[in-house]
Image (tube, grey):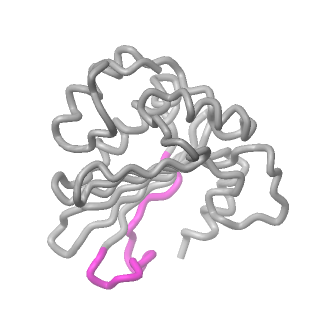
C-alpha cells in the first residue's frame, strides 16, 4: 500500500484527508495482514504500512493523537470480535479493528468506509461493499448505549472472505464524534450476532 501523498505526515482524519484518501485509493494494493494470518505477519504488515506507521514499541496496536479532540487507534487481536473465547490460538489474528474520534469533523459511515479502503486496499473494500447486511441497529428497544444521551448505530455484514462490524456513536443532537470498525474471520459471526441481538 503506497501513500498517494509522500509529504502527508501522520494520520489525517479531518476533511482535508478526503483528497489524500481519494489519491490513495488509486494506488493501494490488497491488504495482506488480515484476520486469519499469523501474528508475525500482522506485526510485519503494521510495521511497514505507510498509513499505520507505528511508533517504536508499537506492535499490534497503534494509537495516534492527531490534534486535540482527534484520535485514531488500530488493533490486531488474537481474540474473537465478541471478546468471548473458549480457546485462543495465540499465533493467529482473528480480529482487526480501528476507531476514529474527531470532535472537529463529525464521523459518517462513508468516512469509516474510506478508512477501511485506505487501510486494506480495494480487494477487501470490495468484499465489504458486496457483503450481505445481517444485522442493522438500532431497532426498537435494541442495544441502548451505556449513556442514555447517546445512540449506537451499527451494522454487521458477511462478505465472501470476511465479516465486518461498523458502529457509530451519536449524541442527542445527532452528531457523531466516535466511529469504529472491525474486520474479522467469519467463524466468529455467530458469537457476535448472539451478543448483539436483543
Residue at x-position 76% and y-position 64% = 85
In-image side of 99 versus 102 (left or right):
right
- Residue 24's place in the image compared with 182, above or below, is above
Residue 115 position within the rendered picture, expressed as x and y whole percent measured from the top left:
37, 38
Residue at x-position 57% and y-position 38% = 159
Residue 173 position within the rendered picture, expressed as x and y whole percent measured from the top left:
15, 71
- Residues 194 and 18: in front is 18
Residue 153 position within the rendered picture, expressed as x and y whole percent measured from the top left:
36, 63
Residue at x-position 24% and y-position 61% = 176
Residue 77 position within the rendered picture, expressed as x and y whole percent measured from the top left:
65, 51
- Residues 46 and 119: in front is 46
In-image side of 14 versus 136 (left or right):
left
Task: Name the image quarter holding residue 155.
Answer: bottom left
Residue 161 visible, this orientation: no
Task: Name the image quarter holding residue 136.
Answer: bottom left
Residue at x-position 29% and y-position 42% = 110
Q: Is residue 39 magenta?
A: no
Bounds of the magenta segment: 133-150
- Residue 76's place in the image compared with 141, above or below, is above
Residue 135 visible, this orientation: yes
Residue farthest along the bottom direction in this orientation:
148
Amino acid at each position: 500500500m503506497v501513500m498517494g501523498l509522500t509529504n502527508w505526515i501522520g494520520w489525517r482524519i479531518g476533511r482535508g484527508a478526503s483528497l489524500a484518501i481519494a489519491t490513495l485509493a488509486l494506488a493501494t494494493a490488497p491488504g495482506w495482514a488480515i484476520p486469519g494470518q499469523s501474528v508475525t505477519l500482522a506485526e510485519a504488515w503494521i510495521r511497514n504500512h505507510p498509513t499505520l506507521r507505528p511508533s517504536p514499541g508499537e506492535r499490534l496496536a497503534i494509537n495516534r493523537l492527531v490534534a486535540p479532540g482527534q484520535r485514531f487507534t488500530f488493533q490486531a487481536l488474537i481474540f474473537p470480535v465478541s471478546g468471548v473465547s473458549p480457546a485462543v490460538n495465540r499465533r493467529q489474528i482473528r480480529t482487526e479493528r480501528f476507531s476514529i474520534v474527531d470532535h472537529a469533523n463529525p464521523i459518517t459511515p462513508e468516512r469509516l468506509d474510506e478508512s477501511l479502503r485506505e487501510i486494506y486496499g480495494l480487494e477487501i473494500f470490495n468484499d465489504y461493499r458486496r457483503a450481505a447486511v445481517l444485522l442493522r441497529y438500532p431497532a426498537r428497544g435494541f442495544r441502548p448505549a451505556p449513556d442514555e444521551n447517546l445512540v449506537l448505530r451499527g451494522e454487521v455484514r458477511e462478505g465472501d472472505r470476511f465479516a465486518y462490524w461498523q458502529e457509530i456513536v451519536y449524541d442527542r443532537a445527532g452528531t457523531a464524534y466516535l466511529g469504529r470498525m472491525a474486520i474479522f474471520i467469519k467463524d466468529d459471526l455467530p458469537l457476535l450476532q448472539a451478543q448483539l441481538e436483543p
